[in-house]
Amino acid sequence: MPIRLDSASSDFEQSFVALLGGKREASQEVGDVVAAIIADVRTRGDDAVVELTNKFDHTHFTAADLRISPEEIDRASARVSDEVRAALQTAHDRVKAHHEKQLPTDHIYQDALGVTLGTRWTPVDAVGIYVPGGLATYPSTVIMGAVPAKLAGVGRIALAVPTPGGQISAVVLLAAKIAGVTEIYRIGGAQAIAALAYGTETVGRVDKIVGPGNAYVAAAKRQVFGQVGIDSIAGPSEVLVIADGSANPAWIAADLIAQAEHGGGAQSILVTTEKGLADAVEAEVDRQLSLLPRQDIAREGWDEFGAVITVASLDEAAALANRIASEHVELALDDPDVILPAIRHAGAIFLGHHTPEAIGDYVGGSNHVLPTARSARFASGLGVLDFMKRTSLLRCDPASLAALREAAVTLAEVEALDGHGRSISIRLNH
Ligand SMILES: NC(=O)c1ccc[n+]([C@@H]2O[C@H](COP(=O)([O-])OP(=O)(O)OC[C@H]3O[C@@H](n4cnc5c(N)ncnc54)[C@H](O)[C@@H]3O)[C@@H](O)[C@H]2O)c1
Ligand SMILES: N[C@H](CO)Cc1c[nH]c[nH+]1
Ligand SMILES: [Zn+2]
């Protein structure tokens, strides 16, 4: 049973804080396991990656198996049906069209003193994209990672995909081919993140690692940050549905189940102004779960991490949504625009009764790699800018340097950094 809360009850705040602090993603235990894996990969390179992959993914690999050959990519891609190929192409084209609009422009201007100032954007040289593969396969995540990377102009893109049992999904390989990525490793978890961050004999190191994954992947990304860049923490998936009496309980239940079925700590929360809707949705989740062929993961996720919260008003719902800062927020309301401005912390917002979150997972065009575990308070979903850096440009001539000299030298004196002041004055003292 999911936890049931009512904002009017006296112990609400305590229960809500407990819900926010639930350990779905980071734990000391996971952190320790991941630290040991990273240290092992740094020390022993391929040998460690092979051993850990065989252990966690139940494979029988040698180092020669880690990278997928171009022939294997072609052979597997050719096996994929035309229907799936067309769906991937639709996803690719729509994600590309939307992300093209994120491309930044350089700019340069001269101010009143004659100083030239500019901003220049350049791509990251090499990125690793993690594509999860433990409980499900995610060809859609290949598109979500590779398309913005390509648009940004990244020179080298490496994919890491775990292959439980050793079999890589042909659809994942086709998605990579459609997106124009050919460097693919069948490795997962913390060992994949460590191999991409530090490099091994087979896996070339990258400058930045992006992509979602389970608690081990999320913890590993946290731990290698600094050695490489990371996008955000895109851990176990979450949805927060805000609904009033206009919502269809069966549709809401389906959306809550869709997120719970990701497993590995995925969380589905309903916040509603209608107690009747809350009851109906709970009953519907039970009914619909029993219709799913693979209901175990979703049922476990719903029972362990699900929550149904009743509130007095939509304003209260928005305030709770901002505290939860969910990866996905669905506004299942006749007029979602009324509450939209009040929702400030969310990875992605889905408006109205006919926008299930799952459409954004695949073909909506927006990115599905989104911040989780309340990190939407300060982070954004994956996009073109995650694959680029911004460099400032500055040019003075003698007149503008002279005009700025006094203030700069004063600040250098305040900081007792005489060398700084001198490096300015020396250019003007003749
Ligand atoms: N936030 C997002 O944008 C987003 C998008 C897609 C998926 N997801 C999430 O990604 C996750 C995918 O998880 P997954 O498990 O299916 O695949 P995964 O690829 O993230 O993890 C599989 C790997 O986890 C490692 N692992 C598993 N158990 C371990 C243990 N006991 N010790 C050490 N390492 C261990 C193994 O190396 C294995 O290869 C889900 O939680 C899903 O919600 C998030
Ligand atoms: N909901 C996941 C996190 O945004 C993404 C996904 C991929 N495939 C299905 N769902
Ligand atoms: Zn999903």
Image (cartoon, rainbow, N blue to C red):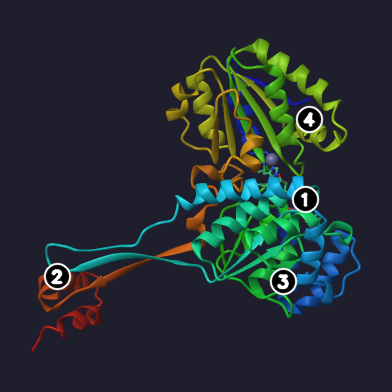
Specify few, some or many for label 4: CA neighbours under 10 Å numbering under 14, 14-19, or 20 or more.
Answer: some
Residue 384 % position (x, y): 50, 56
Image position of 221 (left or right of 334):
right
- The tag earlier along the polypeptide, 1 or 2, is 1
Which one is closest to the eye, mark 3 or mark 4?
Answer: 4
In three-dimensional space, the C-alpha distance between marks 4 and 1, rounded to whole angstroms, equals 23 Å
| Res 170 visible | yes
Three-letter residue code for mark 2: Leu
Specify few, some or many for label 3: CA neighbours under 10 Å numbering under 14, 14-19, or 20 or more.
Answer: some
What label does residue 13 carry, if any?
none
Three-letter residue code for mark 3: Ala
The residue wearing badge 2 is 404
In three-dimensional space, the C-alpha distance between marks 3 and 4, rounded to whole angstroms, equals 36 Å
- SS at badge 1: loop
The residue wearing badge 4 is 303
Three-letter residue code for mark 1: Thr
- Dots 3 and 4: beta carbons under 8 Å? no
- Dots 4 and 1: beta carbons under 8 Å? no
In the image, farthest residue toward the top: 276
Residue 69 % position (x, y): 78, 72
The residue wearing badge 3 is 39
Specify few, some or many for label 1: CA neighbours under 10 Å numbering under 14, 14-19, or 20 or more.
Answer: some
Q: Residue at x 11, y 83 (%)?
A: 428
- The tag earlier along the polypeptide, 4 or 1, is 1
Three-letter residue code for mark 4: Asp
The image quadrant where one finds the N terminus is: top right
- Dots 4 and 2: beta carbons under 8 Å? no
Image position of 106 (left or right of 253):
left
Relative to residue 102, is residue 352 depicted above or below? above
Q: Residue at x 75, y 41 (%)?
A: 262
- To which quarter of the image does residue 6 belong? top right
